[in-house]
Image: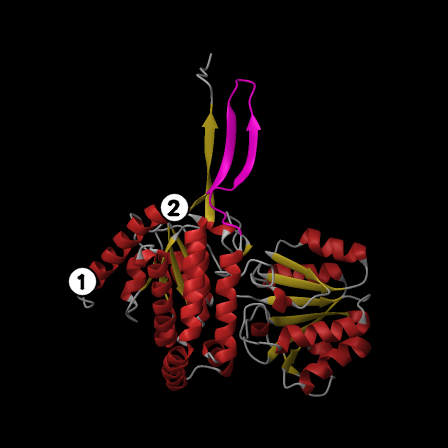
Amino acid sequence: MKDIADIPALMADIGANAKAASAELGFAPAETKTLALNAAADAVWARRAEIIAANAKDMEFGRDKGLSDAMMDRLMLDEARIQGIVDGLRAVADQDDPVGEVITEWDRPTGLNIKRVRTPLGVIGVIYESRPNVTADAGALCLKSGNAVILRGGSESFHSSSAIHACFVEGLKAAGLPETSVQLIPTRDRAAVQELLTMVDTVDVIVPRGGKGLVGLVQSEARVPVFAHLEGIVHIYVDAEADPQKALDVILNAKTRRTGICGAAECLLIHESLIDTLGRAVIGALIDTGVTVHADERLQFIEGTIPATSEDWGKEYLDMDIAARVVSDVDGAIAHIREFGSNHTDCILTDNDDTAARFFQRLDSAILMRNASTQFADGGEFGMGAEIGIATGKMHARGPVGAAQLTSFKYLVEGNGTTRS
């Protein structure tokens, strides 16, 4: 590999190696990819002490950088979280191989048989922040779907990501697949990201996973197609016909289980008939658990709230904060979400089927939920084993992006000496 000081040469080598690897991965047998993923999982568990030691360096870097508690939580790895990484790798390994799957098939009067089958995208560049487990998730899903991947983790997770990536290389070796099938950019230099975004000859798609700043940079500067993964400005609407206990359970879980993930609730919309009853109870419970509630004028009478400002609507806190506002009905909630949402995940709490149907029909978020915690907005919880992220755009993939969403398709057309008149 070229001298790391020469970033363009470094990235050119990485791109060429990825493209060469993708040609082999595109027809790699399913059992070979499964072997690689299970061997990588074995390596992660065997080397968990090394990974935790590497993570300690990243945690120190994060503290020096002044990361918030929520971001530090995203960054932290312990044995339980490493077990989660191992479980995710095995879950992806156990899934059906999407490559070659016949999506649909039909015959034409001309005598042609036509099949639309799944095929890998080729080379995927994944740019992400903080969470080192994305190294494993992204590597696993790209490998399963027959794609080579170039990973660029956040500067704060550099050592953890490098340790996890080394386990992937071990898995690839065990399966006899190209070691360059999963590559991690070996530098924190941001110039490497700029290069990756313009490598149209070797990279087929870019997947950014992070905050508005990262995604905005990628969208504005990329010449390679992008799967957008915008921030999770997640809303929960508490309808007049919400079940009080369900509402309390769901809201507390959606906000406090893990505040630093993109499925965490960030804004609570309360039907005006509930201000003095369920609304007061829910806000009180949030405050009791340590959540700062940024309340609109109609809710500020509740002890412990603080006044919301215009900046609180459409804000992703990723912390123990939530905005709260009164709306007149489901249409008021829909209007608010359309104005301030990010098309990620939004939820309604109601026992009224018609109201829920209206909410589902009139909003176009990638994920819409009813009477369930928004913390379920996750590929693993959807049965995908893992995810690269939640796609909020409208092209190709939407919602959790698993292995099947990392494929395109091609047409296989068969005749029998068939000619066109």
Q: What residue sits 49% from the left and 38% below the top?
A: 117
Quarter of the image holding residue 126?
bottom left
Q: Is residue 300 left or right of residue 406?
A: right
Along the polypeptide, which appears first: circle 2 or circle 1? 1
Bounds of the magenta segment: 96-118
Indicate the secondary structure of the residue bearing disc 2: loop
Q: Is residue 271 in view from this perspective?
A: yes
Quarter of the image holding residue 234?
bottom right
Amino acid identity at mark 1 = Lys
According to the image, label 1 marks what residue? Answer: 2
Q: What residue sits 55% from the left and 66% below the top?
A: 232
Tell me residue 309's x, y (percent).
60, 76
Q: What residue sits 64% from the left and 62% below the top?
A: 346
Q: Is residue 108 magenta?
A: yes
According to the image, label 2 marks what residue? Answer: 26
Tell me residue 10's x, y (percent).
22, 61
